[in-house]
Image (cartoon, rainbow, N blue to C red):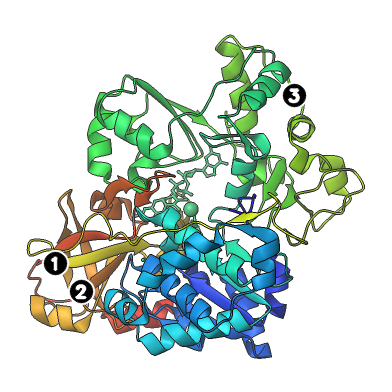
Amino acid sequence: MFGAGAMTNSIPEIRDTDLMFVIGSNTTEAHPIIAMEMKVARQRGAKLIVADPRRIWLAEHADIHLQLRPGTDVFLLNAMAKVIVDENLVDQEFIAKHTDGWPALRENLSKFTLEKAEQVTGVPAADIRQAAIWYATTRKAGVYYTLGITEHTHGTDNVYSLANLVLMTGHLGVRSAGMNPLRGQNNVQGANDAGASPVFYPGYQRAQDEDVRRKFGEAWGIGEAPGPGLNLNQMMKAVEHGEIKAMYVMGEDILISEPNCNALEEGLKNIEFLVCQEIFHNMTTEYAHVVLPGAVFAEKDGVFTNSDRRVQRVRKAVNPPGEARPDWEILIEMARACGYQMPQYRNPGEIYAEMASLSPKFAGISHERLDRTPWGLQWPCVSEDDPGSDYLHKGGPLIGKGLFQTVEYRPSAELPDDAYPLVLSTGRVLYQYNAATQTRRDAGTNAKAGENFIELHPDDAKKYGVQDGEHVKIVSRRGGVKAQVWLSGRVQPGCVWMPMHFAEAAANRLTNDAGDAVTGTGEYKVCAVNLLPLKEKKPAASGAELEAVRHPQD
Ligand SMILES: Nc1nc2c(c(=O)[nH]1)N[C@H]1C(S)=C(S)[C@@H](COP(=O)(O)OP(=O)(O)OC[C@H]3O[C@@H](n4cnc5c(=O)[nH]c(N)nc54)[C@H](O)[C@@H]3O)O[C@H]1N2
Ligand SMILES: Nc1nc2c(c(=O)[nH]1)N[C@H]1C(S)=C(S)[C@@H](COP(=O)(O)OP(=O)(O)OC[C@H]3O[C@@H](n4cnc5c(=O)[nH]c(N)nc54)[C@H](O)[C@@H]3O)O[C@H]1N2
Ligand SMILES: [Mo]
């Protein structure tokens, strides 16, 4: 909608902001450093609005916690937009100069009344109204969002709705404001920048575009480079249906991370050839025909690009063990073995230079320059003398005009019913990292969070007759796993929450693989489950004891 897939603003700008609208981000646990910046801003007097179905730690610091029902963000956000229109708080000048599609959006908002929003989301109308007014009337107001927004079948609609709010209030191209997706892994931004995506070549150049395909094809001496490929969700389903014969998995433990992994596991049993390029054995390597040992971050040179588009150097500190080698070296040899004479780059700097020569957004970035720039360079950085971009869209959206998108509210793909009456949402805890192949080797993190658990509201516990600390089985239409009950006021009645980290009780045995219409991202944040008490005699540590271990004193 604006022309760049990254945070519009920078992390250091957060402490100077006057309002933070944090939605679908458990910032304290998943982005602790950013959460600290938010608390610095908070102490300075900035307002904090948190929209999250759970009472996450950050909500304790919030002026307003919009504790919506999972999957109802489209309603919440459009109701906020309607308040902003009704109260005459839109930025008319910005809309006229810098956007397209306003009349259609404005018209579409009429159905999102506060009364209906309260019914659908469960959030008091007065809170929605107050949040909207504060957001619209604060100049330095930033939106921060993560997976609570994107991991839904209507994830793209959620993002559209948020971006509409940003455009209608003109909070774009302003320091300490903007629209800020907080990225997940240390270099997931860099991986996307480099074209690790089915729809983009490096620098967000579209694979759909013939000129782009020709440009890369010529540079690589292969005629025309191929068009868009399958997205992750489509690939996993193709494996399940036996349509993919061979797969090369690099740095993902698909069996723990992909939704509905029972079905995927069946597919992997039948795949003809599976290669895993890994630093450790994990659930997926069990099915691999070949495992290629990669070097870990500290054993290789390169760059990481973080959420705020900042490219920084990483340097080798130790030698890789045994036969392990940097991923780029393995890929070059693979390409050559497959018959493509990929150049023998001598180091990652040469690879970066090639990418920069083909991607205007990074044209001014090189390893040599980064070596002289300890704080890194933020793209777009178009030439050697360009200092890079701290915040984007100064003087108007990069693509010329911001495009308003009208959206309709659609419920999640799988709603609770009599057989599966609870809504399950999944995510992260502070002490484990994603597939936890790395963090579960460490006694310290395991002491903090070493076993699967489920957050359950005391009212629901009473209904099921289970106690704090007891073990239960959670079942969905796709599978079942064991978990320890943590009685928690953190979730709403009717909702449960489980971390994704524990291979022996993987949350993704339960989740639904229905994907977002545009991105294919699975609906990790909403599926229907039931709970079966296991009738244990003696509960382990109580939920209160567990929380005391987990909750940092901040
Ligand atoms: N400690 C730690 N940090 C990590 C990771 C890790 O595994 N461990 N992983 C990294 C990665 S890869 C990523 S992508 C990020 C993810 O960072 P987050 O997205 O912050 O992590 P999640 O735990 O998935 O939490 C999403 C939040 O969305 C809320 N939520 C769920 N459903 C909804 C909904 O319908 N609407 C709204 N508004 N909110 C909802 C949840 O209650 C939760 O608070 O974290 C990164 N940081
Ligand atoms: N239920 C549920 N499932 C989810 C999510 C959720 O919220 N809920 N979130 C999703 C999200 S946002 C993400 S990002 C994924 C994360 O899922 P994954 O990407 O599977 O998890 P990671 O632990 O980040 O890392 C994957 C693998 O990379 C390996 N690795 C680490 N460093 C290197 C390296 O330098 N080279 C190589 N070759 N390998 C390396 C690790 O050993 C690990 O096995 O999970 C997704 N799955
Ligand atoms: Mo992620």
Q: Position of residue 3 (x, y in %)?
A: 64, 49
Of the 4 image quadrants, the one containing the C terminus is bottom right
Residue at 82% from the left image edge and 44% from the top image edge: 382
Direction right: furthest residue: 385
The numbered dot on residue 421 is 1
Residue contact between numbered discs 1 and 2, judged by CB atoms under 8 Å: yes
Q: Is residue 432 visible?
A: no
For label 1, the crowd category at 10 Å Cα-Cα, with few meaning under 14, some 14 to 19 and many 20 or more, is some
Residue 150, above or below 338: below
Does mark 3 have its CB less than 8 Å from ligand 2?
no
Residue 353, above or below 119: above
Is residue 248 shown left or right of residue 7? left
The numbered dot on residue 345 is 3
For label 3, the crowd category at 10 Å Cα-Cα, with few meaning under 14, some 14 to 19 and many 20 or more, is few
Residue at mark 2: 494
State the separation of the CA atoms marked 1 and 2.
7 Å
Q: Secondary structure at mark 2?
A: loop
Q: Secondary structure at mark 3?
A: loop
Q: Secondary structure at mark 1?
A: loop
For label 2, the crowd category at 10 Å Cα-Cα, with few meaning under 14, some 14 to 19 and many 20 or more, is some
Q: Earlier in the sequence, mark 2 or mark 3?
A: 3
- The amino acid type found where label 3 is placed reads Tyr
- The amino acid type found where label 1 is placed reads Pro
- The amino acid type found where label 2 is placed reads Gly
> Camera-side residue: 77 or 60?
77
Q: Nearer the viewer, mark 3 or mark 1?
A: 1
> Camera-side residue: 61 or 281?
61
